[in-house]
Image: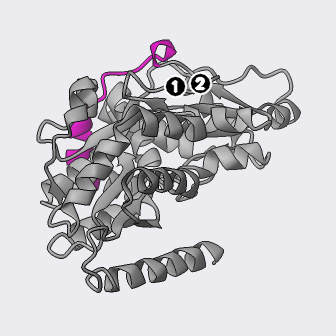
Amino acid sequence: MKKVVRIATAALAFASVIACAGCSKSTNQTLLVYSIIHDEETEALTKLFTEKTGIPVSYLRATTGELVNRVITEKNDPQADILLGGASSYHIQAAKEGALEAYASPLTKNLPSYAVASDNTWTGFCVLTLGVGVNEKRFAQKFPGTPLPATWEDLLNPAFKGEIVMTNPAASSTGYLFVQNQLQRLGSEKGWEYLTSLTKNVGQFPDSGSAPAKLLGTGEYAIGISYLHAITKYNAQGFNVKAISVPQSVGDVDCISILKNAKNLSAAKKFVDFMLSPEAQSLMSSITFTTPVNPEAQGPEGGIAIADIDLIDYDVQKASSEKSEVLDTWSKSVK
């Protein structure tokens, strides 16, 4: 209920900014952002952007599924200018629906190819990698003498029933990325067999991608499936959690896009340029422990280097094109 109230309050405040967007002739018209990344980094990044450019920013923070659906629904009359955050498959989905504006920032020339859409409708600003988190104290109490999980298959141990937390793939890009991880590394038939077996051990499917790491930190679960940077962040904050990079994982990029027919196009392009800059990505990394895509940005201390992670050859186009079918199978046959 508290979550609903927070989103409703934020949406009301955001709507008031939209309603007044045309009230002023000022050249510093408010930039409107739909943000999938957390409030802490959204606030820090938008504040720095305003300090550097003088352009005020208002944002609405919600889950990936909610905001991507908004972007698609509002494509003929967008109520925001920017979609900030979310895995590339979701931005590809929005682009296919004609909801995104192509923009090739000058800074993309320094970025790896996997971080830039071929049609320039989205650009990655940090690397996201899935892994396993363990609350070592709870794990030792619940499973004395049991080795920590080191592979995805280790999570199928019947002893772990009710002690695993993973995100709901129908609501979160994190959860959907995990589902695709298993389908692409194992193939469709064995992948669905794996997911069906795993869900028997899962005690909770929260909608937010950040929830598993938080629930591990508070000791409510022994094992969580999450982004490695989220687990590493909680460890750095003093929580008794350990990040485990398991073989055959998936990596993706958190992306930014400009909405088609954006009312503040010039400001939106400046915000994209800002998010691809070393300064913005270093700030983001210092808060989230994510790995920046700009090679000139400073990476996180204590983070797991991308070179130390065993990744499958992830087909993001496949993940995007079959999303509806996969989620339908998930809801009918798995959970």
At 39% from the left and 53% from the top, the residue drawn is 330
The reply to whether residue 90 is in sight is no
For mark 1, give the secondary structure. Answer: loop
Marking on residue 303: 2
**Membership of 308 in magenta stretch:** yes
Q: Nearer the viewer, residue 28 or 325?
A: 28
How far is mark 1 from mark 2, CA to CA?
A: 8 Å
Marking on residue 299: 1
Query: Which residue type carries mark 2?
Result: Gly
| Residue 119 relative to residue 106: left or right | left
At 16% from the left and 62% from the top, the residue drawn is 260
Q: Quadrant of the N terminus?
A: bottom right
Residue 2: x percent and y percent? Answer: 65, 75
* Contact flag, marks 1 and 2 (Cβ < 8 Å): yes
Q: Is residue 12 above or below residue 200?
A: below
Query: Which residue type carries mark 1?
Result: Gly
Q: Nearer the viewer, residue 199 or 81?
A: 81
- The magenta span reads 306-325
**Membership of 269 in magenta stretch:** no
Residue 209: x percent and y percent? Answer: 53, 50
Picture quarter containing residue 301? top right
Report the coloring of the rendering: one colour
The reply to whether residue 270 is in sight is yes
Which secondary structure class fits the magenta region best?
helix
At 58% from the left and 54% from the top, the residue drawn is 40
Residue 71: x percent and y percent? Answer: 27, 66
Picture quarter containing residue 303? top right
For mark 2, give the secondary structure. Answer: loop
| Residue 41 relative to residue 204: left or right | left
**Label 1 neighbour load within 10 Å: few <14, some 14-19, many 20+:** many
